[in-house]
Image (cartoon, helix red, strand yellow):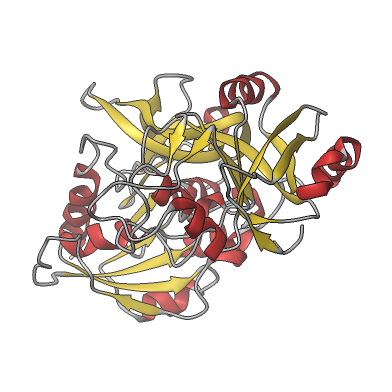
Amino acid sequence: MSTPISAAHSTTNPVPALLALADGRTFRGSAVGAVSATPVAGEVVFNTALSGYQEILTDPSYSGQMVTMTYPHQGNYGVNGVDVESARPYLTGFIMRECETLPSNWRSEQSLPDYLTQHGIVGIEGIDTRALTRHIRDAGAQQAVIVSGRAADDTGKAVQAARSAPSIEGRDLVREVTCAAPYAWSEPTPGNTAPKARYKVVAYDFGIKRNILRLLVDHGCEVTVVPADTPAGEVLAMRPHGVFLSNGPGDPAAVTYAADRVGRLLGNVPVFGICLGHQLLCLALGARTFKLRFGHHGANQPVQDLATGRVEITSQNHGFAVDPEQLPRELEVTHVNLNDRTVEGVKHRSLPAFSVQYHPEAAPGPHDSAYLFQRFTQLMDSEK
């Protein structure tokens, strides 16, 4: 992987770019954003959301990955400073059918190509994203590289670079995205006024999204965010009413220290986990995880709440899932994915702890999953 060396986005004189997959499949297009003469690598996945590219770009859970957007037009409404989910993009590449250079929206502050250039993110447009998506669906998510300029002419070298790129499996990417020191968060959802804080919550940052923090504040929480390797004893010394386990990137089985922290917290304080936090809660109790063929990335995943029978349309971003055959008896499955029956939520049968695999804070149009934050506050009330 290299540092992007320049920027390019021109409809009259585009810079050639090449996307090369480890299995030898290649796609030619034009460079968008930063340009790198040497291969920039990542696991290539696809996201089926119709909008939300800014939130996707700044979701730390995409660290180590290249995201293909299945919707053909990206950048139509530009980029603004309010909708980001973290301080910067963490993905390694952005793949599009067509990128708009002249956004039209009253909230827009910057074009998507300029934003990618500013943050050194390589992008490629002009490829058949439908064909790429179908290929990933059939062949599975895999390592890939993007090269730009004259380097795009050497297909063989690019494919070899993709084959040499490290796999997501077994990699601890959490250490690359977690905060360096604890900090307080008090900002509510834009347009809302924060209510008086009734609960003290410590949130583990495995790659946390800002909208999670905002919704915790909306629900009356005084939030302290701590690094991923913070010892359980230090967290309990803060005397929180509850502990939140955030989303994050990479292989959950590689983040053994985090699962150990979670295990030491269980039974001492109510726990709520989302995405990677869900997986770590399960691992702490003896479950196992496995890699999905192409993962769940999008804003239209149907999930059923087994207690009520209701179906939620959810936003998701994960490449691993909890193995239902290796689930400990202490955990009860509460939610399942209706596309592939994977585990989407669990709760402990006797301790105040629950988690979901999807992202209730993302609200992809409907607010089907907003009740989960209220469930967390109710759990904290019951344990006061």
Q: Residue at (64%, 44%) from the top-left corner?
A: 14
Where residue 127 appears, x then y in whole percent? Answer: 62, 30
Say whether residue 66 is left or right of residue 348. right
Q: Is residue 322 visible?
A: no
What is the x, y in percent for residue 361?
A: 29, 48
Question: Where residue 64 sits in the image (x, y, percent)?
Answer: 64, 52
Q: Nearer the viewer, residue 84 or 172?
A: 84
Number of marks present in the image shown: 0
Q: Residue at x 61, y 22 (%)?
A: 137
Up-down: is 28 above or below 233? above
Q: Is residue 291 left or right of residue 342?
A: right
Q: Quadrant of residue 160?
A: top right
Q: Looking at the image, which is closer to me, 165 or 303?
A: 165
Left or right: residue 269 versus residue 344 is left
Quadrant the C terminus occupies: bottom left
Residue 312 appears in the figure:
yes
Q: Position of residue 185 (x, y in %)?
A: 29, 73
Q: Compared with residue 85, is residue 131 higher up or lower down, i.e. above or below?
A: above
Q: Is residue 184 above or below residue 348?
A: below
Q: Residue furthest front?
A: 12
| Residue 275 or residue 380, whichever sits in front | 275
Tell me where residue 38 sits by quadrant: bottom right
Residue appearing at x 21%, y 34% in the figure? 366
Quarter of the image that includes the N terminus: bottom right
Residue at figure coordinates x 74%, y 48% from the top left: 148
Whether residue 265 is situated above or below residue 66 in the rendered picture = below
